[in-house]
Image (spheres, grey):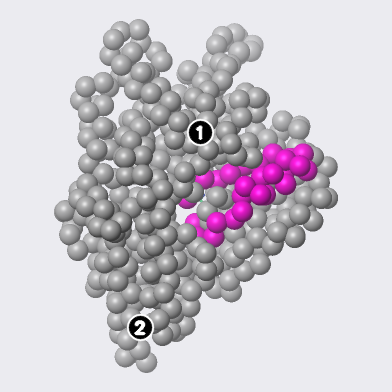
Amino acid sequence: ELNGYFEGLKRDFPIFSHDPSLVYLDSAATTQKPSSVLAAIRDFYERNNSNVHRGVYPLAEAATELYESSRRRLSGFVGCRPCELVFTKGSTEGLNVLASSLSICGDYDTFIVPVFEHHSNFVPWQYHARKNGLRFIPLPISQNSLDMSLVKETLQRMNGRFVFSLAGLVNSTGYRPPFEEIGSLVHLAGGIMVLDGAQLIPHEKFSFSESNVDFLVFSGHKMLSETGIGCLVGREKLLGELNPFVFGGQMIDLVGKEETIFSEGVAKLEGGTQNISGAVSMLAAVEYLENAGMERISTHVSNLTSRAREKIRAIGGYIIHSPESSRAVITFTHSRVHSHDIAEFLGRKMNIALRSGHHCSQLQMKELGIISACRASFYLYNTFEDVDRLANSLEEAGRWFDEFR
Ligand code: PMP
């Protein structure tokens, strides 16, 4: 029944009417866009295009109102206040702003990051810690999960001046760490918690104000919007203390020859002309996701993931690396065929789009004892039929490569 509902929604995504045989299983990399989002972008440029927060003429006010209404709607979506939400280029930029600012503010001496993180949530912390003489703790994992006793042990050794940065959903395996519990442990130990929501926010209802998270980042393009737009959410006081990252227009109050006074609040972190149509696209995307129903999306995507797990397990030759409870993502290898060969076979012969490689997580791959894997990732426009075509094609790929032996 739920599958039928989402089969209907698939018609909202023009890419599938242009290419009806396409099975798109790479939504963890970026999602397809519904007509309503594409129309909102076009409508913005046709009717409301102007820079924001600058002009006093009606068109500029309309553009500003759209941009700010996107901020309000997104704040509602993730349960924060509009004064806590900054527009960024995406998760990577948000994490870079945080790592660079928190490494020089003097309040922290340690950054802790599990080794399964996406490089965007690993390298900035490692780089800025090294550069500024902070301790960097690459937290060990067991295969693909967090060992909670190790987490507790590590936190017990802390002196309250640390940052713990963690993915809400790990992109390379679909593992969902118990970030709620870790957040409260981090707070008990006196540290602050950063949540990389790049994969979580598209898939699950989340409330920032009710969470134990101090900063949250996410990307628009992984939740039906344009590329080049995302959000950094932070507790008002902590956000206010961050250093500006990009200096220029809009983020200043008063410029003197010797010194400049910066704007207060979110404006300080939005230097230069922003991706206004991107913000508009996120507004339309959130409307689409809320109409489709976040709980329905979560359930449907979980059903797809379980079905894929069972079907791939039933085919000989494939090894599943995702944990049993993985969400939205299933990662696997073939015991004799390279993952690029499998992905290329599926792409060229079957029109199935699936990722292969290290998924920007080389340390996680090392932990699994592999250098590359195939990753199928699901979203609301996928159906049981897509999963079945994936499984049948994987079986065929195995047979096809076996013939070359
Ligand atoms: N974190 C995670 C968990 C991700 O999956 C990604 C994107 N694959 C990122 C961060 C980086 O996001 P972006 O490229 O949109 O900045």
Q: Position of residue 61 (x, y in %)?
A: 33, 13
Q: Are marks 1 and 2 in contact (CB under 8 Å)?
A: no
Q: Which residue is mark 1?
A: 79
Query: Which of the marked residues, 1 or 2, is nearer the chain's N terminus?
Result: 1
Residue at x 35%, y 70% (from the top left corner)? 343
Q: Up-down: is 156 above or below 80? A: below
Q: Give the quarter of the image for residue 281.
A: top left
Q: Residues within 10 Å of mark 2 (few under 14, many from 20)?
A: many
Q: Position of residue 185 (x, y in %)?
A: 72, 47
In this view of the protein, which residue sits in the foreground, 241 or 371? 241
Residue type indicated by callout 1: Gly
Circle on res. 398? 2
Q: Up-down: is 316 above or below 329? A: below
Residue 181 magenta-highlighted: yes
Residue at x 53%, y 38% (from the top left corner)? 207
In the picture, the quarter occupied by the N terminus is bottom left
Q: Secondary structure at mark 1?
A: loop
* Residue span colored magenta: 171-199
In this view of the protein, which residue sits in the foreground, 6 or 110? 6
Residue 42 magenta-highlighted: no
Nearest-to-viewer mark from 1 and 2:
1
Q: Position of residue 234 (x, y in %)?
A: 58, 32
Q: Position of residue 141 (x, y in %)?
A: 66, 63
Q: For disc 1, does the CB lie below 8 Å from ligand 1?
A: no
Q: Secondary structure at mark 2?
A: helix
Q: Up-down: is 55 above or below 282? A: above
Circle on res. 210? none
Residue type indicated by callout 2: Gly
- Alpha carbon separation for disc pair 1 and 2: 46 Å
